[in-house]
Amino acid sequence: MLTIFTIPKAFRGHVGIIQTNAIRSWLSLQSACEVILLGNDEGTAELASELRLRHVPDVECSEYGTPLVNSTFSIAQDIASHQLMCYVNADIILISDFLPAVQRVHKYPFLMVGQRWDLELNEPVNFNEAQWE
């Protein structure tokens, strides 16, 4: 149904915890979503392997080493299994209302934008628990 793609930062310390939580939340959505990790920052290949995700380490970068958005979007579009695609920052947890919202609008031309709520999570979240939200 949906391909989610992202460009994670290095999986170190707190950033590693929140990114891992976010990506695991995407995998816990009711409908199976394909997840693609782009870039080669520390820990990206390892998490992709652990969670059996698609990983593309080689993306075009700026002179400062920042992955270029046009390159990552183009790569994701070329390899995605689904026509419907979603870019999500690697530290954004998606909850159960996300896919129903996508299903309501996907029949029409759309651009869906979300709002982030800052939440301090310092531990891994168990997304197998029924009441994790």
Image: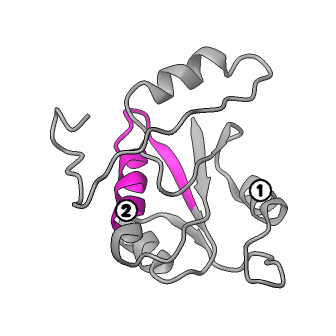
Amino acid carrying label 1: it is: Phe
Number of other residues with Cα within 10 Å of mark 1, as a class: few under 14, some 14 to 19, many 20 or more: some
Label annotation for residue 15:
none
Task: Say whether residue 102 is left or right of residue 63.
Answer: left
Task: Say whether residue 126 is left or right of residue 70.
Answer: left
Q: Position of residue 62 (x, y in %)?
A: 82, 78
Q: Which residue is drawn at the image coordinates 16% and 34% (left, top)?
A: 130
Q: Which residue is drawn at the image coordinates 15% and 41% (left, top)?
A: 129
Q: Which residue is drawn at the image coordinates 74% and 75% (left, top)?
A: 59
Dot placed on the residue nearer the N-terminal end, 2 or 1: 2
Which tag is nearer the camera, tag 2 or tag 1?
2
User: In terms of depth relative to the viewer, which is nearer, 100 or 92?
Assistant: 92
Q: Is residue 76 magenta?
A: no
Q: Position of residue 35 (x, y in %)?
A: 53, 54
**Helix, strand, or loop for circle 2?**
helix
* Residue on which the image places disc 1: 73
Task: Say whether residue 12 is left or right of residue 131.
Answer: right
How many numbered badges does the structure rendering display? 2
Task: Write down the region rendered in magenta.
Answer: 17-36
Question: In which quadrant of the rendered view does residue 66 lie?
Answer: bottom right
Amino acid carrying label 2: it is: Thr
Q: How is the image coloured?
A: one colour
Number of other residues with Cα within 10 Å of mark 2, as a class: few under 14, some 14 to 19, many 20 or more: many
Q: Which residue is drawn at the image coordinates 38% and 70% (left, top)?
A: 16
- Relative vertical location of residue 130 with respect to residue 11 in this rendering, above or below: above
Q: Position of residue 28 (x, y in %)?
A: 34, 43
**Helix, strand, or loop for circle 1?**
helix
Q: Position of residue 69 (x, y in %)?
A: 78, 61
* Residue on which the image places disc 2: 20
- Relative vertical location of residue 105 with respect to residue 41 in this rendering, above or below: above
- Identify the image quadrant of the N terminus: top right
Question: In which quadrant of the rendered view does residue 133 lie?
Answer: top left
